[in-house]
Image (tube, helix red, strand yellow):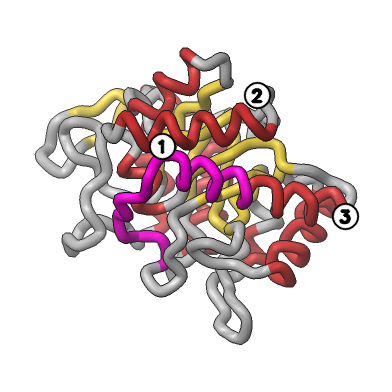
Amino acid sequence: MDLNADLGEAFGAWPMGDDASLIDIVTSANVACGYHAGDASTMRRVCAMAARRGVSVGAQVGYRDLAGFGRRFIDVAPEELTNDVLYQIAALDGIARAEGTRVRYVKPHGALYNAIVTHEEQAAAVVAAVRAVDPALPVYGLPGSAWLRQAADAGLQPVAEAFADRAYRGDGTLVSRRLPHAVLHDPDVIAARVVRMVIEGTIEADDNSVVEVAPQSICVHGDTPEAVAIARAVRQALAAAGVTIRART
């Protein structure tokens, strides 16, 4: 099982998350590409750490929204969105190559990630960007999303993802961050639900229904105070359950 986390989300003098600790736990690093967070120095620092530790580097692409941390929907024209995503992937790949690695996959961030679950036009725009850069790049997303369906139809490799620390709705989508129970914080509770996701392929939704997830990768958010403890607990619990932890790419 692949274990990924959002890294490189600092910006200039403003820190965010404990990249150095998380990079020792996860197998894949979703690196912010400067649009929702991150800057050239942060991107290079995280790529250097990932290269030294053999962690797979992924481009975490988002809306051009530093003030909102990429968590606000933007009704951007499809061609502009394609160009924005292409720019982000190419920028990170150039920095990654300077550190002896490269971008191995693409994962949308925040509001863009959630929008392209159902927004067909924006999903197509992101697919077009990935194909323009490298059609061999795998793409991470929510199972059943328009994004993964269109990616597969276009010949890209979709990777179904589940979230360790986010609450789910009965339809398999994520609970809005505007609600108080959207983000989980207890490492032990989170670790137990991840083992269930991986072993049984299910998770309990906020309405007590059971949702099928069948993940190929598990995400731990890097911007929560408990991120390192959560990632460590998840990795230890999966190992104890006999699950091999390794990057997909």
- Helix, strand or loop status at disc 2: loop
- Label whose residue precedes the other's in the sequence (2 or 3): 3
Which residue is nearer to you in this view: 179 or 74? 74
| Residue 162, disc | 1
Which residue is at the far left? 207
Per the rendered image, the range of residues in magenta is 69-87
Q: Residue at x 72, y 42 (%)?
A: 103
Mark toward the start of the polypeptide (2 vs 1):
2
**Identity of the residue drawn at 20% across and 58% down:** 181
For the point 76% across and 66% down, which residue is it? 45
Q: Amino acid at mark 2?
A: Pro
Q: Residue 135: which numbered mark, if any?
A: 2
| Left or right side of 110 for 136 | right
Read off the residue under disc 3: 98
Whole-angstrom CA distance, mark 2 to mark 1, is: 23 Å
The quarter in which the C terminus is drawn is top right
N-term-proximal mark, 1 vs 3:
3
Identified by mark 1, the residue type is Ala
Q: Is residue 185 above or below residue 133?
A: below
Query: Which residue is most to the bottom?
Result: 13
Mark 1 or 3, closer to the camera? 3
Q: CA distance from mark 1 to mark 3?
A: 31 Å
Cα distance, mark 2 to mark 3?
22 Å
Residue depicted at 64% across the width and 46% down the height: 89
Residue 15 at x, y percent in the picture: 57, 79
Q: Are marks 1 and 3 in contact (CB under 8 Å)?
A: no
- The percent coordinates of residue 3 (x first, y second) are 57, 42
